[in-house]
Amino acid sequence: AGAQALTGAFHSAHVAAIAPLAQQRHVPYVIDITAADQITASIARSVREGQQKVQYVYRIFPGSATFGRNAVRFMAEIFHEARVSPKRVVVMYSNDLFGKTQSESFVAAHEAAQPAFEIVEVIPYPENASDLATEVARAKAAKPDVIAPVTRPATAILLLEQLMKQRVDVMGVISPGAPGLYETRQIQVLRELIEGVMDITVYANYRRPEVRRIAAEFAKRSGGRAFDASAAYPYDAVLVLASALERAGSTEPEALVEAIRTTRLATGTAVYSGPIVFDATGDNPNGSTAVLQVLAQKPRVVWPKD
């Protein structure tokens, strides 16, 4: 239809279908949200090996390896800070591309770091599950101190309701990175069941005054929705495209993609460890995560301290 640039599309399986087509058609594509590393890695490899001349696909979101490393590190730091010693962690995950990739990255990061806690069980469940009674019973039988779910919004509700129903006695629920445990609707539905739950994930950087202003405007326009990662990363992808269009002075694919490749944007609204830039894989090495906790029915960044 004549699109000169693309962004989107939140769901890793959808992004995995769009990215190779954008590359094939020479349409610059700035991925806002997807954690699956293989999407950009496979395109970068084809360019490196000479099968493609130019990379058209770039991602501002942190990759699954970053999620995994940060999750293990932040969990160990929080346990030390709180003077608690959980020993047994059960990982539960939505069995789609996102959930599988994210949980495997967490397990790999755990094996590399060798923290004081052990992963005693890894339990998949269908992305479109209508009941998690069996999976929660299996988790309970493993006698966990912590449940670490990689869950989508609908199954987050099922999971926390089942943990309560089956009286699973844990020290905490801490996700190594998922969209299912901080969105406004989840909190409204789950209420006290989600209070205290933590999610080591992406989020908007509310330390910045301009983000607080944007968040207030976003809430006004969206009927009260929180300016969370699902809002911040699409916002930042548009900032990247706007910057690239201005610097390229053209909508020609090669000029535009060169401007995207050389982006250095310090005004992003999400949590980053530096400006938005792109490496040889087309990824943003400064994409990062933080620990959210639902406190007084609001998601709040509680770690790291800075």
Image: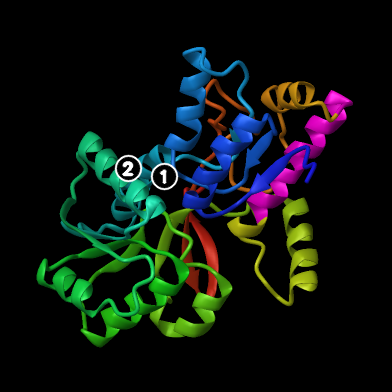
Residue drawn at x 75%, y 24% is 259
Label 2 sits on residue: 105
Q: In the image, 121: left or right of 269?
A: left
Q: Position of residue 293 (x, y in %)?
A: 46, 65
1 and 2 marks in contact (CB < 8 Å)? yes
Q: In the image, 53: left or right of 288?
A: right
Q: Split into 4 quadrants, where in the image is the C terminus?
A: top right
Q: Is residue 233 magenta?
A: yes
Q: In the image, 134: left or right of 202?
A: left
Q: Disc 1 marks which amino acid?
A: Phe
> 155 and 271: which one is in front?
155
Q: Is residue 267 magenta?
A: no
**Residue 249 visible:** yes
**Badge 1 or badge 2: first in the primary sequence:** 1
Specify the label residue 67 is tagged with.
1
The residue at the far front in this view is: 1
Within 10 Å of the Cα at label 1, are there few (<14), some (14-19), or many (20+) other Cα atoms?
many
Q: What secondary structure do most residues of the magenta stretch adopt?
A: helix
Q: Disc 2 marks which amino acid?
A: Ser
Residue drawn at x 45%, y 29% is 42
Specify the label residue 84 is tagged with.
none
**Quadrant of the image occupied by residue 79:** bottom left
